[in-house]
Image: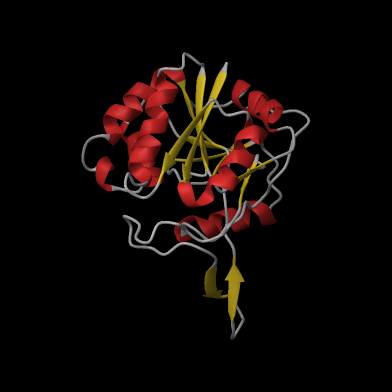
């Protein structure tokens, strides 16, 4: 059994309603800005911890699910090589990993999973049932509670030797609708939205949106892993 929660902002209520039907979510946690992103994610994981499902999945309101999302999700989690899974791995941010991701794409790596000790995004995350309470305890204390939610979960992964690493579905089964942010100030101080940067050999800035490096289905998923390093 898999339980899905959506975390959304009231400014995106139409997106949330559409996403809920596409992913068959059991829970929707809304915020008008008074609660904040981190707390809204915590509330979602708290609900998922009580669901009794084998896996809890938390999806942000600007996620774009692949066709047949529930069938793909079931197949993905059935062979997940670690108890913490990201359903999305994207371009632009965080910057430190993008070179390794570009090299992965250029070398035509075709494993079903990429692995990293970092949680790079919070677009869509799945955690095994027995690990959700442990994650919540970690997230409610410093320093994790002072970090953005994706970095806080990554801090927990690196602190808990039984987790191992974050497994990234490859290709991603969630994409990202890069529409900027409804949050004015993020804990890391970084603005959101498409990134402007000087590409190699280019004199003019290039617009690089935050979208999945690869997005789509697989007819069959297995546990093969490529470590990003």
Point 42% across, 31% down: residue: 44
Q: Residue furthest left?
A: 142
Query: Where's residue 203, x and y in %?
Result: 59, 86
Q: In the displayed structure, does residue 190 sit left or right of residue 208?
A: left
Point 59% across, 39% down: residue: 17
Residue 157 showing in the rendered view: no
Q: Which quadrant of the figure contains the N terminus?
A: top right
Query: Where's residue 98, x and y in %?
Result: 53, 58
Q: Looking at the picture, tell me which residue is in the foreground, 26 or 173.
A: 26
Q: In the displayed structure, does residue 67 sit left or right of residue 103?
A: right
Query: Where's residue 120, x and y in %?
Result: 46, 48
Q: Is residue 14 above or below residue 204?
A: above
Q: Looking at the picture, tell me which residue is in the foreground, 55 or 4.
A: 4
In the rendered view, how is the structure colored? secondary structure
Point 68% across, 56% down: residue: 106
Q: Is residue 164 above or below residue 10?
A: above
Q: In the displayed structure, does residue 33 sit left or right of residue 12?
A: left
Query: Where's residue 178, x and y in %?
Result: 58, 58
Q: Is residue 218 above or below residue 56?
A: below
Q: Residue furthest right?
A: 219
Q: In which image quadrant can residue 77 be found?
A: top right
Q: Residue furthest bottom?
A: 203
Q: Looking at the picture, tell me which residue is in the foreground, 101 or 4.
A: 4
Q: Looking at the picture, tell me which residue is in the foreground, 20 or 13.
A: 13
Q: Is residue 178 above or below residue 2?
A: below
Residue 56 showing in the rendered view: yes
Q: Residue furthest top?
A: 52
Numbered marks: total = 0
């Amino acid at each position: 059994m898999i339980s899905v929660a959506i975390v959304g902002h009231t400014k995106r209520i139409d997106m949330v309603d559409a996403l809920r039907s596409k992913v068959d979510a059991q829970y929707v946690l809304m915020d008008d800005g008074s609660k904040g992103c981190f707390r809204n994610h915590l509330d979602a994981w708290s609900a998922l911890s009580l669901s009794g499902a084998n896996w809890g999945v938390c999806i942000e309101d600007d996620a774009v699910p692949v066709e047949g999302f529930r069938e793909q999700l079931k197949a993905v989690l059935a062979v997940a090589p670690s108890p913490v899974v990201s359903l999305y791995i994207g371009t632009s941010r965080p910057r430190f990993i993008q070179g390794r991701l570009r090299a992965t794409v250029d070398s035509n790596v075709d494993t079903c999973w990429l692995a990293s000790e970092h949680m790079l995004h919070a677009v869509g995350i799945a955690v095994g049932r027995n690990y959700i309470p442990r994650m919540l305890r970690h997230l409610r204390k410093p320093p994790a509670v002072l970090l953005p939610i994706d970095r806080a979960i990554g801090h927990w992964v690196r602190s808990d030797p039984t987790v191992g690493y974050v497994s990234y579905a490859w290709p991603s089964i969630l994409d990202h609708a890069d529409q900027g942010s409804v949050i004015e100030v993020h804990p890391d101080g970084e603005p959101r939205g498409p990134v402007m940067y000087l590409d190699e050999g280019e004199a003019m800035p290039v617009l690089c949106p935050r979208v999945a490096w690869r997005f789509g289905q697989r007819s069959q998923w297995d546990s093969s892993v490529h470590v990003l390093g």
